[in-house]
Amino acid sequence: MAVDRPRRRLTASPAAWLVWGAVALFFVNLAGLIGSVVVSSLGTRWFDSWLPMGYTTRWYSWAWREFGLLDVLVTTLEVSLLVIVISVALGVPASYVLARRSFPGKRALTMVFLLPVLMPPITYGIPLATMLYKVGLAGHTSGVVLANLVPSVPFVILTMTPFIEQIDPTIERAARMCGATTAQVFRGILAPLLLPGILASSILVGVRTVGMFELTFLTAGPDSQTLVVALYYSMSAAGIRAQQSVDAMAVMYTSMMLVLLVVALRFVNPTQLVAQATDDPDR
């Protein structure tokens, strides 16, 4: 015979209600800001009213032609791919050494790698841009790529180290005992196991590169602007241009960043980025 159990009443403390209220207020404000930009990019005229007088999509085509977004997107893609390839080529071996080897000064070296990730980019961006201008690299795609490598390589190390630590070292030792060389161990064992981590770090670096404003702004020239810098210049440049066209450009930029972020979260677990802090006592 079933016995009815008394139901517990779920009550929240005033502090919990305050926290949830603040979170809800933040998301409402965020949705309002994004919604106003999207509505403005589709409106014909919008003066002293809750909604525009009419709606149109011509501002997107106008912004595409006026701001030369095709060239900007090609440049953004070129810079992002170069930064991803070089960052992975440098960061994966460095993260392997940090995950597998113990040596004096390992903790200090790890902190040096993490400084560009923790520090605001503008703090080291100005002296970095000054040096790049002196050697003639700034103002070109090469200067933008070199500047973005400063935070991207440490970010790959931060992302890849937990992935490498999760691989049992005995697998590598067993392969070496069977006569496999270092290159064979990497190609046959490490590369397939690290592929999800490499893909995740590549996507995250791409997101950071596309959204990086300070370093790109300080080192970019007329032909090496990424989308975020072009958006800034479209808002601050002299002349009269419709606000709806700038909003349309902002919507395209936000949509691209949202797609990249969703893809990144599909392949990486954010909790893995701090796993080494609890797994490795030497850190």
Image: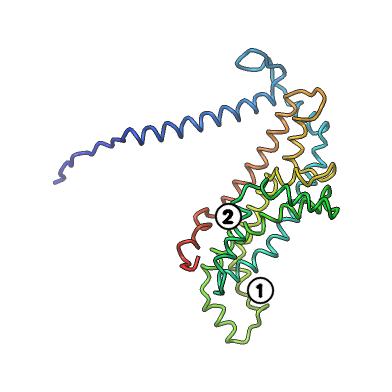
Whole-percent x, y for residue 84 in the image: 70, 56
- Considering depth in this image, is 89 or 108 the residue closer to the camera? 108
Q: Residue at label 1?
A: 187
Is the residue marked by circle 1 packed among few (<14), some (14-19), or many (20+) residues within 10 Å? few
**What residue do we see at 38% from left, 32% from top?**
18
Q: Residue at label 2?
A: 267
Whole-percent x, y for residue 81 in the image: 74, 54
What is the three-letter code of the residue carrying label 1? Arg
**What residue do we see at 59% from left, 62% from top?**
160
Whole-percent x, y for residue 33 in the image: 59, 28
Left or right of residue 28, residue 81 in this image: right
Whole-percent x, y for residue 83 in the image: 73, 55
**What residue do we see at 53% from left, 70% from top?**
167
Q: CA distance from mark 2 to mark 1?
A: 21 Å
Residue 215 vs 61, above or below: the answer is below
What is the three-letter code of the residue carrying label 2? Phe
Is the residue marked by circle 2 packed among few (<14), some (14-19), or many (20+) residues within 10 Å? some
- Considering depth in this image, is 242 or 140 the residue closer to the camera? 140
